[in-house]
Image (cartoon, rainbow, N blue to C red):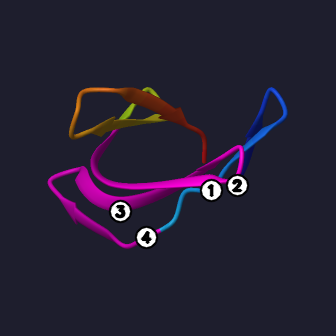
Amino acid sequence: MVRVSGFVFNVSGYESLVSGFGFRVCSFEFQGFEFRFWGLKFRVMGLKFWVVGFGLRVLGFG
């Protein structure tokens, strides 16, 4: 769980790694609303980036 600017983001789901890449189902809670989507995860310089189906990039830590 990552807390940013008073908002809580929950990232959960399953992960299947293939050649350093992984797909994960993400669940985000934002002001009581929940959004679920498929995303692509890749690691660059120790940081995890999440690229969702509609092109929005969400930076994840962990």
* Residue 1 badge: 2
Which of the 4 image quadrants contains residue 5?
top right
Tell me the kind of residue under disc 2: Met
Question: Mark 2 vs mark 4: which is more N-terminal?
Answer: 2
Q: Are marks 2 and 4 in contact (CB under 8 Å)?
A: no
Within 10 Å of the Cα at label 3, are there few (<14), some (14-19), or many (20+) other Cα atoms?
some
Residue drawn at (25%, 58%), measured in percent from left and top? 23
Q: Mark 1 = which residue? A: 10
Question: Mark 2 vs mark 1: which is more N-terminal?
Answer: 2
Question: Mark 1 vs mark 3: which is more N-terminal?
Answer: 1
In the rendered structure, the answer to whether residue 47 lies left or right of residue 18 reads: right
Give the magenta range.
13-42
* Furthest-right residue in this view: 6
Residue drawn at (33%, 54%), measured in percent from left and top? 37
Q: Position of residue 50 (x, y in %)?
A: 37, 38
Within 10 Å of the Cα at label 4, are there few (<14), some (14-19), or many (20+) other Cα atoms?
few
Tell me the kind of residue under disc 4: Gly
Nearer-the-camera pick, 54 or 11: 54
Provide the major secondary structure of the magenta segment.
strand
